[in-house]
Structure formats: structure tokens, C-alpha cells
């Protein structure tokens, strides 16, 4: 599984996730740091990456578009430091690998995690 780490997370996540066996790249290495979220989503979709972010806009984009890809992992905690949250994120990625490879939005906060299968758009009546 390839992870695309958003600008709002430290590049230190790359080494931590790589050491855990994941292919990871920080957006600042492959794209324009000031790019719109839609450009990041397009890149992730084209390169079969899971977006790893602290930005709630990515979930909103998935809901608004009804997209089936890319998968997104949203961290919804104040402390997003890899040394504090790393083990929790690695465990989550391993447990949810199948969902992420198929298309999912996963939200992780202080006490819970939620997995939503893509697409998020509700069927119209």
C-alpha cells in the first residue's frame, strides 16, 4: 500500500511508515506545496495512493463527488506527531489494509476510529 502524506503532516511520517513496511511519500516531494486538495486527490488516484491527512476537506471532497478512490485516512487529534501517534496509525493501517485497498475513508480520533466504504454519496430516491 502506498501512502501520500499531506502537507499538514510532518515529513517525519515518511520514515516511520517506511520502516513499518509501507511505501510512503510526502506531498512536498512530488507536488506543489500550495496545490489545491483536488490536485492532491487527483495525484493519489493516478498513482494508486492512500491520502494520509489531518485535513477534513478530503472527506468532504469524497462525499461531494461520490468518488470510489482514493482512500483517505484522516487523523482527527490535536497531537499528530509521529512519535506519539505512530504505533496507533501503523496498527490502524495494518488492520484496515483491505478496506483501504478497496476504497474507504477512515477517521481516527482520540478514542475511536470509523471506517466508511466508498463511495460516500447516498443513493438518490
Image (cartoon, grey):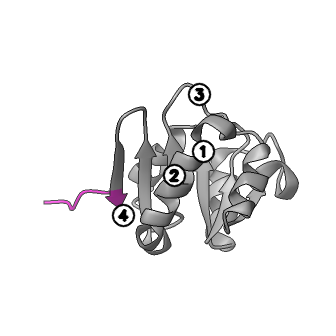
Where's residue 59, x and y in %? 46, 47
Q: Which mark lies nearer to you, 4 or 1?
A: 1
- Report helix, strand or loop for mark 2: strand
Camera-nearest residue between 59 and 113: 113
Where's residue 79, x and y in %? 59, 27
Q: Which mark is residue 53?
A: 1
Provide the residue designation for mark 4: 119
Provide the residue designation for mark 2: 73
CA separation in Å, label 2 and label 3: 15 Å
CA separation in Å, label 4 and label 3: 29 Å
Indicate the quadrant where residue 43 lies.
bottom right
The crowd level at tag 3 (other Cα within 10 Å; few <14, some 14-19, many 20+) is few
Where's residue 81, x and y in %? 67, 34
Residue under the point 43% across and 64% down: 95
**First-in-chain label (4 vs 3):** 3
Q: Which mark is residue 72?
A: none
**Residue 45 appears anywhere in the view:** yes
CA separation in Å, label 2 and label 4: 15 Å
Span colored in magenta? 116-125
CA separation in Å, label 1 and label 2: 6 Å
Magenta residue check for 118: yes
Q: Are marks 1 and 2 in contact (CB under 8 Å)?
A: yes
Provide the residue designation for mark 3: 79
Amino acid at each position: 500500500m502506498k501512502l501520500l502524506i499531506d502537507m499538514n503532516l510532518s515529513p517525519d511520517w515518511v520514515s516511520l511508515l517506511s520502516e513499518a513496511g509501507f511505501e510512503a511519500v510526502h506531498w512536498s516531494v512530488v507536488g506543489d506545496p500550495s496545490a489545491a486538495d483536488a490536485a492532491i486527490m487527483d495525484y493519489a488516484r493516478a498513482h494508486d495512493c492512500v491520502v494520509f491527512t489531518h485535513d477534513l476537506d478530503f472527506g468532504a471532497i469524497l462525499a461531494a463527488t461520490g468518488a470510489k478512490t482514493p482512500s483517505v485516512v484522516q487523523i482527527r487529534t490535536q497531537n499528530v506527531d509521529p512519535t506519539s501517534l505512530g504505533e496507533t496509525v501503523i496498527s490502524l493501517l495494518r488492520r484496515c489494509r483491505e478496506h483501504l485497498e478497496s476504497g474507504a475513508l477512515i477517521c481516527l480520533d482520540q478514542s475511536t476510529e470509523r471506517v466508511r466504504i466508498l463511495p460516500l454519496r447516498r443513493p438518490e430516491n
